[in-house]
Image (spheres, helix red, strand yellow):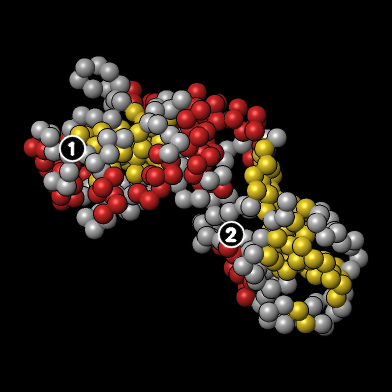
Amino acid sequence: MTGLTLRLDGDGWRTHLRDVAANTPGLVPVIKGNGYGFGLRRLAQEAAGLGVDTVAVGVAAEVETVREVFGGSIVVLHPWQAGDPLATELASDPRVITTVSTVEHLAMLAGSGPSPRVLLEVLTSMRRHGIVPERLAETARQLEALNHGGVKFEGWTIHLPLLEKGRYAEAQRLGRAALAAHPGTLWLSHLPSAEAMALSRELTGADGRPAPLRQRVGTRLWLGAADSRSTTATVLDVHPVRRGERIGYRQRLVPADGWVLVIAGGTSQGVGLEAPTSASSIRQRAVALATGSLEATGLALSPYTVAGRKRWFLEPPHMQSSMVFLPGKETPPAVGDEVPVELRLTTATVDHIVES
């Protein structure tokens, strides 16, 4: 095999999946984007193996792939938009649950087809999508008016930020406001299971039962067992170089005698691509600034490990390969060897998944 390879300890990974499922009442696995590096189809199959009745996808276009191998309900997390014909068509599928984030869209969707199943999103401090708490009562009145064949209400969805500080208090406040407006199931993201269950008990209804709860989990489920996987890249070519020689598209000067390693993996597979920094402390920002300064001068540390150390890019990654510098004192790998590569699996696309 040539390219980027994800090697997976299948037994270890599935043991982790079962542990998360057993400790997450109302689990709704999230299957979206690139499938957390595993692919949508594979994750849909794994979710079916866990015995869950519902999964969530990011956007309407992901439903078809998941629906082919998963027989339960599918939540579309991205809110319904009036100008999206696919989302409107899928809202008529009895297996699809459509997220609605505005009062106006609720009425529009109700008139678009036979009784769609809907989740109503409450605006959180994320400030991304949702109905402001002040309009929940109005939304509930409209929901009551639509209950006779208009829509089927599946509950309130609350998408919380990742930071711990204030997160439970926010879930508590918004959950209470939503249930006061209209009883239903709370669908939560990014709240630890113990806190979610505590919230369910705290928001006990008039019948004395805890509030019904569903917990959406993505990264913690699929990528939580880091020791069950490793990623490698194939060495495609090796060339000796001397200091001062020019290489690559940009003909940059080689900093010292050594080796040019051409290794599988480039921008089309997510190598060398980063999300904006999440640095919040002064130290983290200083590190980010220093790293950015190095990258601006062409000195960027690659994710490839050769002879026990991460090595420097000689220039930005190409579309499907990267050029990395190895100092002359080191023994270069042979063409066809595999070297470790650190990939952010939520943005990477591997060529092969090998399960043991």
Mark found first going from the N terminus, 2 or 1? 1
Q: Secondary structure at mark 2?
A: loop
**Residue at the farthest top position:** 208
Q: Which residue is mark 1?
A: 115
Residue 54 in the image: x percent, y percent? 38, 32
Closest to the observer: 25 or 177? 25
Residue at figure coordinates x 77%, y 59% from the top left = 235
Q: Is residue 196 visible?
A: no
Q: Is residue 15 left or right of residue 230?
A: left
Mark linked to residue 270: 2
| Distance from the alpha carbon under mark 2 to that under mark 1 | 41 Å
As drawn, which residue projects farthest toward the front? 68
Residue extending farthest to the left is: 145
- 75 on left or right of 118: right
Residue 344, numbered label: none
Q: Position of residue 342 (x, y in %)?
A: 67, 53
Disc 2 residue type (three-letter): Gly
Please state the horizontal and vertical placement of residue 325, each as a whole percent of the image. 78, 68
Q: Is residue 14 above or below residue 231?
A: above
Q: Residue at x 58, y 59 (%)?
A: 270
Residue 79 visible in rendering: yes
- Measured along the vertical axis of the image, is residue 225 above or below residue 87? above
Q: With respect to residue 62, does 309 lie above or below?
A: below
Q: Determine crowd level at label 1: few under 14, some 14-19, many 20+ residues with C-alpha closer than 10 A.
A: many
Residue at x 64%, y 40% (from the top left corner):
226
Q: Is residue 259 left or right of residue 189?
A: right
Classify the position of the C terminus by image quarter.
Answer: top right
The reply to whether dot 2 and dot 1 touch (C-beta < 8 Å) is: no
Amino acid type, residue under disc 1 in the picture: Ser
Above-or-below relation of 343 to 323: above
Q: Residues within 10 Å of mark 2 (few under 14, many from 20)?
A: many
Judge from the rendering whether residue 213 lies leftward or rightward of residue 191; answer left or right.
Answer: left
